[in-house]
Amino acid sequence: MKGMMMHRPLRIADILTFAAEVYPDSEIVSVRTEGDLHRTNYRETAGRVAQLAHALQAMGVGFGERVATLAWNGYRHLELYYAISGIGSICHTINPRLSAEQMTYIVNHAEDRVIFVDLTFVPILEKLKDALPANLTFVIMTDRAHMPENSLNALCYEELLHGQPATFDWPEFDENTAAGLCYTSGTTGDPKGALYSHRSTVLHTLIVPLSMPGVFAPGRKILPVVPLFHVNAWGTPYTAPISGATLVYPGPKLDGPSLFELMDREKVWSAWGVPTVWLGLLNEIDKQGRPPEGFGHMVVGGSAAPRPMVEKFENLGVDVCHAWGMTEMSPIGTTGQQIAGMEAWPKDKLLDWKARQGRRVFNVEFKIVDEAGKRLPHDGKTVGELHVRGNTIVAGYFKNDAATAKAVDEEGWFGTGDVAHISADGILTITDRAKDLIKSGGEWISSLDLETIVMAHPKVANCAVVAVPHPKWEERPLLIVTPQGEPPAKEELIALLAQHLAKWQLPDDVVFVETLPLTATGKVSKLTLRQEFKDYALPDAVPARAS
Ligand code: ADP
């Protein structure tokens, strides 16, 4: 017998319609590429989104067609998210930090019809133009006064909206209709497309705030440093409006001093981003001798937040919430939000807990498996590859059966490529990415374990551990460090590691560099480091492996 309840399709457009009606005055504040600060709210945004939807239809953009964006975090990018998906087209966000070759590949693979581009990125498209589909329309996201000379024959965003009606009768369609397309950064092989649906996006929007009690609420000021051009800025374009929270967008200014100034001026309460961004902010906090005013909460993810970083922010009175996920998961899979009762925990226990990846969110199921695909126990110590299942997780990759077959296991779960253990009470600890593990003499060394320890050294600004080929042991770990001021002695770092690890797990050598290479999503690029150091001559004395 079926329940006798109405069935209304879950639609993204309804999120903004709701916000405009219930939280009309909650703000969206943006640093613009034009150089100034712009303020709007959900009521005005809903009107402009309606105008944009009319403009898209007038341009002939059809149901299911892909419309791309190449833009920073700002109110126009948010408008595109809603207008494109609202008319049943697909919002394809492009990461501007991808290589020219990767960008050409994904625009062609996605068969984009239109590309909306921020002023900053016009030159990128001018260079690529000849390799892109011939029928592509370009729109520059600015007003007439700021339109640059360009060879794209581009339209002007504000002119498109001008004169269009500020209401739109959003069409009804199946909730499984595709809404968004985001390609992984493709650190190995071609980028792969995750194709989100209205249903998966709305469910993600309902699920995530539940896992972070107290974070999403009317009046909360949230700063997503995590870009709208990568995995939906961790869902914030939807979770903020649905809860009436204010969005503060940093535009192109992501360095420590600019973020500090914006957060201080706008009294941002919660800031979201990858660890490398927070290292920049910490530097500025050190210089200013205080945190930005009003800063009380942060979400850190994308790669593991080192415990010493968690500790520094906690000591400043910032409640740190670790989150784990991936493009293929919409993206959030776990959050480590502190909940009532935990304030009484001893500080060390709290910091240890916060440096782990946190609790799974509702509807994301976990299993860890060995190399043969056999399930392993969730006992907080047995390590295996993490597989996930749920309504917010890809069932396959867009137009890529070969990659789908590799990623989805026989039971229909998605293999994350992350290596982890899970405690009986469901707390996830990522121990490494499978491809970053170091295989030494038949044993695995977790690069993350070593990095976490080294990051605690006061003279270390950032570090990475990568595998270097070795004739006898297959691979050995090399520690690469960017120092904080005067570099520490190598022996000091090895001695620090030796307090926690077995001798065979210690790096064979330490190298000091000025900066670490970053991926298109702002994480330390181990792939680049592995390539750079593949011929590195390790010292002869190789520690004998235990056992
Ligand atoms: P990309 O492959 O483009 O970097 P994602 O941003 O989707 O794509 O990266 C997902 C991966 O980032 C995860 O599989 C995991 O390895 C890593 N990751 C994300 N969040 C965390 C976290 N909190 N702790 C450790 N690793 C993380």
Image: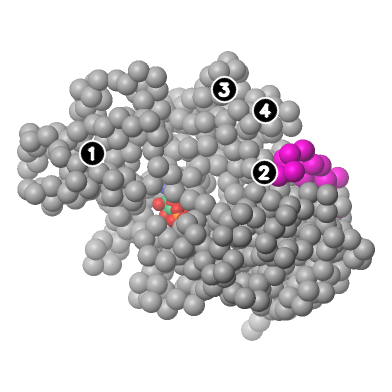
Say few, some or many: other residues with alpha carbon within 10 Å of mark 4 (under 14 / 14 to 19 / 20 or more): some
**C-alpha span from label 2 to label 3:** 21 Å
Type of amino acid at the residue the image marks with label 3: Ile
Say few, some or many: other residues with alpha carbon within 10 Å of mark 3 (under 14 / 14 to 19 / 20 or more): some
Res 10 → quadrant: bottom right
Of callouts 4 and 2, the N-terminal one: 2
Secondary structure under tag 3 reads helix
Say few, some or many: other residues with alpha carbon within 10 Å of mark 1 (under 14 / 14 to 19 / 20 or more): many
Contact check, label 1 and label 3, Cβ < 8 Å:
no
Mark on residue 542? none
Q: Is residue 231 left or right of residue 218?
A: left
Q: Which residue is mark 1?
A: 478
**Ligand 1 within 8 Å, label 4 CB:** no
Residue 257 magenta-highlighted:
no
Of callouts 2 and 3, the N-terminal one: 2
Of callouts 1 and 3, the N-terminal one: 3
Q: Which residue is mark 4?
A: 261
From the viewer's side, name the closer residue of 377 and 65: 65
Of callouts 1 and 2, the N-terminal one: 2
Across and down, in percent, residue 220 comes to: 72, 39
Residue shown at 49% from the left, 31% from the top? 279
**C-alpha span from label 1 to label 3:** 31 Å
Q: Residue furthest top?
A: 289
In the image, the segment drawn in magenta is 25-43
Contact check, label 4 and label 2, Cβ < 8 Å:
no
Across and down, in percent, residue 424 comes to: 38, 50
Q: Is residue 94 left or right of residue 396?
A: right
Type of amino acid at the residue the image marks with label 4: Glu
Of callouts 4 and 1, the N-terminal one: 4
**C-alpha span from label 4 to label 2:** 13 Å
Mark on residue 251? 2
Could one spot residue 372 in this view of the protein?
yes
